[in-house]
Image (cartoon, grey):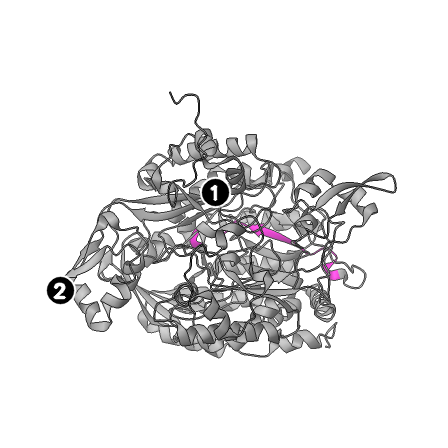
Amino acid sequence: MAEEVKKKRLTDIGPHDYNEYLSPTIKKNYGKWAYHEIIDTGTMVHVAENGDKLYTVRMGSPRLVSGSFVRDICDIADKYCGGHLRFTTRNNVEFLIEDEKNVEPLKKDLEKMGYNVGGIGNIVANIVHTQGWVHCHTSASDASGVVKSVMDELYEYFVEDKLPSKTRIAFACCLNMCGSVSSSDIAIVGTHRKPPRIDAERLRNLCEIPSTIAACPTNSIRPDTVDGKPGVKVNEETCVFCGSCYTVCPAMPIANAENDGLSIWVGGKVSNARTKPTFSKLAIPFIPNEPPRWPGVVNAVKTILNAYKDGAEPGERVGEWIERIGWPRFFKITGFPFTKYHIDDFRLAETTMNYSSHTRL
Amino acid sequence: MGKKHQTPLLDELKKGKWISFVKEIERAAEKSERTEDLLGQVEESYRDKVNHWKHGGMAGVKGYGAGMVGRFSEFPEKYPGIKECHSMRIIPSAGFFYNSDFLRKLADISEKHAGGLLNFHGATGNIQILGMSQAEAEDAFQAIAELGFDLGGSGSDLRTPSCCAGQARCEFANYDTMKICYNLTEEYQDELHRPAFNYKFKLKFSGCANDCVASAARSDLAFIGTWKDKIKINQDEVKNYTKKFNVQKYVLDKCPTKCMWFEGENLVIDDENCVKCMHCINEMPKALRAGDEKGASILIGAKAPLVTGPRMGMMLVPFYDINEDAKNDYEWLKGLISNMWEFWDEYGVSRERIGELIGRVGLNTFLEGVGLEPVPEMVEHPRSNPFIKFTEDED
């Protein structure tokens, strides 16, 4: 009996064949799409070389979803899409519709159920984010709560097309930055401000000292003898509070309720269109955690978005707009103070200085 | 029936127009009682302004060193339902295409064997089921395997590769992103399930330079679709666009190399000077299409900040004839990847991503190691400092 069970155990079966999930129109026109058109912020149509059309309706999701949510979207997909749907990189749900007649009823059903249709065109896209306090041990802030607070405030920009270009906001609850947070139009990043606390006894049992030392980007962790036994010490003068040591050594916790919070970064982009991909740059070094609604962060994001909306030319992403007007003016318009923290002092710091007399006075 | 825990702070996040994750956790708790305790603990985090998860602790299934991430509550007596609250990572269907039948069955599994909560998707692209205990892992794994799905990567291994919708639903795709993503995921099962690398390694596939999966910002090896020959112009459609908006201002003037202009009413493109950035095609998809000699650029070394700072992917192979290599089961690429992993294994140190290794030893050392020749596309410009290390074979 035991032998029989063992034989049946499935393992290493590999990825599932995606062909099973492609709708008939997609299968027929795979690699033969001619163009697409955006109909409104919730709808686009892809047209194949032979004239076949595939409509897509996009809906926001909080990424963290219940089984009941999954059944809801399945019901919609069954009713209007022959059961076919997909997700986007930014955690949206996309319903793939073959019959144009189903587009509006589908959207009405979603709206009746309280779901958010939008996210296509010159909009604020769904915020990609991390787990935060809901499910992560290295987080310096919650993720879902900040995202919910920001998206509630910016909701009109998800459902209406009224920005100069698409605006991608991303959230990471620590410097591990799961996801492409460091190259977003606006990035919100969980930030610690105090060095790790060393629990010498736990460290001896739990951590490998060489790898703990190697984890530090500023060589601030050194071997030490604690009570006659091997341990580590942290040079607090050079520690940059990144939390890398804590990810390899559980005996060096860094979370600190009073000192953790969020920093705001701007002007990054991933796409190569027009300008090269670029990292986001520091706008605000620190805003305290203010659960449940994080008004400081929400206001900061809104300030940036409003300034961008007022100042950018059509088609300009946030970073392209700031490049054109210059950083001094960005700080002036937003009212964010430029501080010593805005001047880089890490690995490539020298490459970020202004080696010229170019200045907008 | 009252709530197990009072959550006045989280309740604030049930208000507003954007879909509420708190409501989602509550819906999950209706089906999976343990998730009540997740609400309790998260409320406590909202009060204390700090997370309440323990660090460390393993979780996994037999024969795999990856695919599950252990998560333990700091207060197991107070919140027994999430004493163990592990996540199970599942390799997604390429391009994130699914059908309702599979998703319903997965929802059932998440409620039967875990907390009834899922991520579509994790940052790397896995489906995640949250709130599982170690005792449930094997049954959940087998139930998922019966649906034809396998566990994803975690830790120092090949992370689950991901790709854009590609040719399935995008006219911009210059190669079959889903096919190569599927092929390499299948090929590298062992590297994915059994961590043996210095650190994580990510592969991502974007069909064009719009890079919808952010491959060049977050994958060690990024594939970005491109083409060699001329952009195809439909002059009639160009004329239609000129009636709709200012093509000169918003398309031509924005071209990074100014390689296009009007001669009379006709659009002319100096294709030799085109860098395939996609801007003109994005703006006028009915008028302009990529050429026929399609392939991909390969960029290497992108990563997030830890340990030595963030890196953007840098050009390694300007034109990889991916469509030709596809006919040979991607033999050339698999050879290159194998050389890279060998070099990384030999010279990299623990927790050093391949981009950081290249930064440390220099691009030339890496190129020699993997058997690629230096080409000018790799650099922004040639060196401007005179500290040249001439080698002895240079007589």
Q: Can the viewer see residue B72 in this picture?
A: yes
**Residue A148, x across and y down, in percent:** 57, 71
Side of A100 relative to A291 (left or right): left
Task: Name, please, the residue furthest toward the front.
Answer: A357
- Residue B86 shown in magenta: yes
Q: Assess disc 2: are there few (<14), some (14-19) or many (≥20) residues with their C-alpha within 10 Å of its C-alpha.
A: few
**From the image, which quarter does the C terminus of chain A lie in?**
bottom left
Does dot 2 land on a helix, a strand or a loop? loop
**From the image, which quarter does the N terminus of chain A lie in?**
top right
Viewer-side label of 2, 1? 2
Residues shaded magenta = B81-95
> For the residues marked 2 and 1, what is the alpha-carbon distance in whole angstroms?
48 Å
**Residue B369, x across and y down, in percent:** 47, 29
Residue B284's tag is none
Q: Assess disc 1: are there few (<14), some (14-19) or many (≥20) residues with their C-alpha within 10 Å of its C-alpha.
A: many
**Residue A318, x across and y down, in percent:** 43, 66
Mark 2 or mark 1: which comes first in sequence? 1
Identify which residue, A2 or A216, lies in the foreground: A216
Residue B265's tag is 2
Does dot 1 land on a helix, a strand or a loop? helix
Image quadrant in which you'd find residue A118: bottom left
Q: Disc 2: which chain? A: B
Q: Amino acid at mark 1?
A: Thr
Task: Name, please, the residue furthest toward the right.
Answer: A227
Q: Can the viewer see residue B93 in this picture?
A: no
Write the residue at 56% across / 30% down: B346
The number of numbered discs placed on residues in the rendered structure image is 2
Check chain identity for marks 2 and 1: say if they share one: yes
Q: Amino acid at mark 2?
A: Glu
Residue B185's tag is 1
